[in-house]
Image (cartoon, helix red, strand yellow):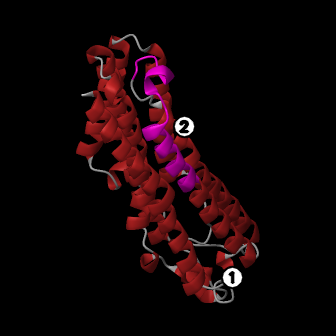
Amino acid sequence: MESIAQTLFYLAFAGQILLLSWLLPRGIVQRMRAVMSQYPPEDYPRLYPSSPEIYVAVRWIYGVANHAILGLGVVLLVLLVFVVDHATFADDGYISEAWPAAYAFLQYLPLMALSALEFRQFGRMRALAPQTRRSASLERRTVFDFLSPNAVVIALCLAAAAFVMMLAVDELDGAIWFLVGTGFMAAMGYWHLYGRKPNPHQSAEDRRQEQDVALHSALYVSIVLSLFYMYIGADQLFDLDWLDALVMSLYFQLIGLLSVWLMLHRLRIEDVDFSVYRDGPEASAS
């Protein structure tokens, strides 16, 4: 069983390396390159509140950072397979879940930095936006305009089950962290639904599509979070330590698929209204 678990983990960790440090970043870089190519600064000035060279530099740095982390992951995989003595590294003798968790933290750092820069650019857009009266939709949307009530109920039931399971196995710290994680996802969903529109030029339809993707992503991630903590509870009951590293690696890959991949797949460039970034009357945002 131990050898099977190790083999499955090595395969999963190889998938984590490729997915989070190559496939998803490659999709983001291609999207950034396509936007600049199809919608250049001279024709869409409102899309570039900073110098265009800055966006090229950010894209290059983001790509280099992910390639570096990709190379580190390959080295780490080789060490885990051929060098590291897991019996002395972890108390239970199995592959420690700290390996995929610590590496996933590194893998998500470039994405977090890119997201922070994106919000900074939105702030510059608001500062530079013409102070004109804009029309806005007065329709007050609720979460059920985007999400199925059944899906929300399932997510709430799983969250309740995970919380109760944490308490049942005397994992009070785990229960608290689960509430923090679930609360964060709920807060993100609320902000996307009712918060101020970050991009001042974004059309109403694009905003609605972005909200739809964000709310579905938050729902799916919260479900995965509940299932992950339910596994932690099951681990305490049935001694599943041999699966810990494998589950941890798959968990972070699911987070990437349900956030980055979902965004790339659902928010396609060809469906975005870029006319709002032109100068002139046709650039008025809805």
Mark seen at residue 98: none
Regarding residue 5, the answer to whether it shows in the image is yes
Q: Secondary structure at mark 2?
A: helix
What residue is pinned by disc 1? 45
Amino acid carrying mark 2 in the image: Ala
Q: Is-magenta flag for residue 145? A: no
Residue density around tag 2, few if under 14, some if 14–19, many if 20 or more, within 10 Å:
few
- 197, 33: nearer the viewer: 33
Whole-percent x and y of residue 209?
Answer: 42, 65
Image height of 148 relative to 52, above or below: above
Q: Which residues are magenta?
A: 69-93
Q: Earlier in the sequence, mark 2 or mark 1?
A: 1
Q: Which residue is mark 2?
A: 102
**Secondary structure beneath disc 1?**
helix
Marks 2 and 1 sit apart, C-alpha to C-alpha, by: 40 Å
Q: Could you tell me if residue 218 is visible in this image?
A: no
Residue lying at 43% horizontally and 20% vertically, measured from the top left: 175
Where's residue 48, x and y in %?
69, 76
Q: Main secondary structure of the magenta part?
A: helix
Residue 242 location in percent, x, y? 33, 26
Furthest residue toward front: 82
What residue lies at 46% left-to-right and 46% top-to-bottom? 189
At label 1, the amino acid type is Pro
